[in-house]
């Protein structure tokens, strides 16, 4: 039953990607930001209508301190400014209208090497845990994901 639920969960994520490293801008239009990035960095022809939605995921953090708990730590805004705590950018979840658009973007992710940007698949919780465990044991160069499956290079 757990495997069926995981398969269903992953199939609902098949048109999604996560883009890490896009600086946060409160006035940004997430979809326009993603379209500009994909066109300029990946040279993939894409328009806003190819995206169902794009939004930030996760809790906003200040260099590892959650914004909601910064006040609990007794830090005022002035103190945070003095410590130069800058917001850590949250990943952008992008949902595409068509799977082949997502596949084209994901296939061109290597063009981002050397930049602070990273594109990953949106994995289910179970597959994300499996991926992390495999990376811990085998290293990042020997583990990757493709179409929601965790792949391992075995020697």
Image (spheres, grey):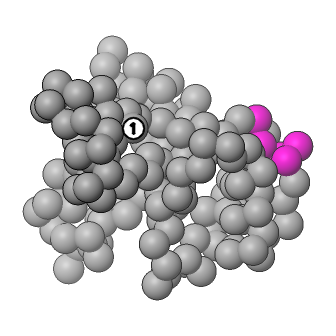
Residue 146 is at least partly visible in this image: no
In front: 89, or 142?
89
Asked where in the image residue 58 lies, by quadrant, the reply is top left
Tell me: 126 left or right of 18: left
In the image, farthest residue toward the front = 78
Magenta-span inclusion, residue 54 = no
In the image, farthest residue toward the bottom = 114
- Which residue lies at the image location 52% right of the left edge and 58% below the top edge? 23
Characterize the magenta stretch by its predominant secondary structure.
Answer: helix
Magenta-span inclusion, residue 49 = yes
- Which residue lies at the image location 47% right of the left edge and 61% below the top edge? 21
Tell me: 64 left or right of 59: left
Q: Which residue was labeled with disc 1?
A: 60
Tell me: 130 left or right of 112: left
- Which residue lies at the image location 48% right of the left edge and 44% below the top edge? 122
Residue 3, above or below 115: above
Residue 99, above or below 117: above
Return the x and y of residue 9 as percentages of the image width and height: 48, 26
Highlighted magenta segment, given as a residue range: 48-52
Residue 20, above or below 77: below
In front: 17, or 75?
75
Residue 23 is at least partly visible in this image: yes
Q: Quadrant of the N terminus?
A: top left
Asked where in the image residue 42 lies, by quadrant, the reply is bottom right
Q: Secondary structure at mark 1?
A: loop
Return the x and y of residue 71 as percentages of the image width and height: 23, 28
Return the x and y of residue 99 as percentages of the image width and height: 72, 47
- Which residue lies at the image location 25% right of the left edge and 35% below the top edge? 76
Q: Residues within 10 Å of mark 1 (few under 14, many from 20)?
A: some
């Amino acid at each position: 039953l757990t495997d069926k639920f995981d398969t269903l969960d992953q199939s609902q994520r098949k048109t999604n990607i996560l883009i890490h490293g896009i600086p946060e801008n409160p006035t940004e239009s997430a979809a326009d930001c993603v379209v500009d990035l994909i066109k300029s960095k990946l040279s993939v022809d894409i328009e806003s209508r190819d995206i169902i939605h794009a939004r930030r995921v996760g809790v906003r953090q200040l260099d590892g301190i959650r914004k909601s708990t910064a006040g609990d730590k007794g830090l005022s805004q002035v103190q945070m400014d003095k410590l130069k705590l800058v917001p850590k950018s949250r990943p952008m979840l992008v949902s595409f209208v068509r799977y082949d658009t997502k596949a084209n973007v994901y296939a061109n992710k290597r063009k981002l090497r050397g930049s602070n940007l990273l594109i990953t698949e949106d994995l289910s919780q179970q597959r994300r845990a499996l991926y992390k465990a495999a990376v811990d044991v085998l290293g990042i160069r020997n583990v990757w994901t493709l179409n929601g499956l965790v792949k391992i290079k075995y020697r």
